[in-house]
Amino acid sequence: MTILPDVLQPDLKIVFYGMAASKKSADAAAYYAGPGNAFWPVLHCVGLTPRQFEPHEYRDLLDYGCGLTNLEQEQIGNDDELDFSAIGGDTLRAQIEEFQPRILAFVGKRAAQKFLGRKKLDYGLQPDTIGDTAIWVLPSTSGAARRYWDESHWQALADTVKAD
């Protein structure tokens, strides 16, 4: 059973890709719904949305060229609660090949590490691509990851999108 629906369509600017829905997001049936999650504020702060959206408005991101999905569609919880043996990236690769966004942006290193098969990753633009889709790794917006927070990587992504 899919916890949150994919928010995808062809030719998006960015698809934001997380690890899995948190318990709060699953309960709210909305992406990035935890009270300490900075996803919605940072999208507005860096200029990717004209105002700060509420989590239940997640489908409206399509109007701004942005999509959403998660690596794990059937488990709920923080990264340290997930069974990684059951997680694979074949669905994501197929979605990106089908919808061809300009950028695939991982919201947090864990999903990127799992998908790319590398432990050592820096934030920002990666050397990897999926066809013509560039890959970025961004700091997690989860309240649990606040000690690693650096908005500059989000701003660099927004600046890249606006420059194209």
Image: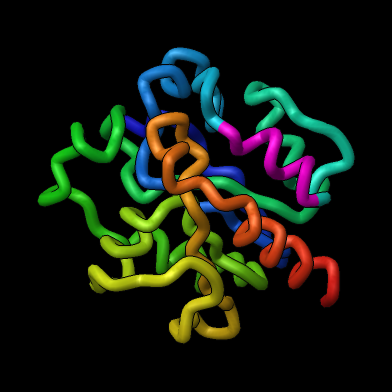
Q: Is residue 158 above or below residue 5?
A: below
Q: Position of residue 31 (x, y in %)?
A: 54, 31
- Quarter of the image for the C terminus: give it: bottom right
79 and 56: which is toward the camera: 79
Q: Residue at x 78, y 43 (%)?
A: 45
Q: Is residue 18 left or right of residue 54?
A: left
Q: Which residue is most to the left?
A: 85
Q: Which residue is most to the top?
A: 27
Q: Is residue 132 above or below residue 23?
A: below
- Quarter of the image for the N terminus: give it: top left
Q: Position of residue 141 (x, y in %)?
A: 51, 40
Instruction: Give the mark count.
Output: 0
Q: Residue at x 37, y 46 (%)?
A: 19
Q: Main secondary structure of the magenta part?
A: helix
Q: Residue at x 22, y 51 (%)?
A: 87
Q: Is residue 6 above or below residue 36?
A: below
In the image, which residues are magenta? 38-46
Q: Residue at x 67, y 65 (%)?
A: 157
Q: Residue 121: name its quadrant.
A: bottom left
160 and 116: which is toward the camera: 160
Q: Position of residue 133 (x, y in %)?
A: 58, 77
Q: Is residue 43 magenta?
A: yes
Q: Is residue 17 magenta?
A: no
Q: Position of residue 162 (x, y in %)?
A: 84, 67
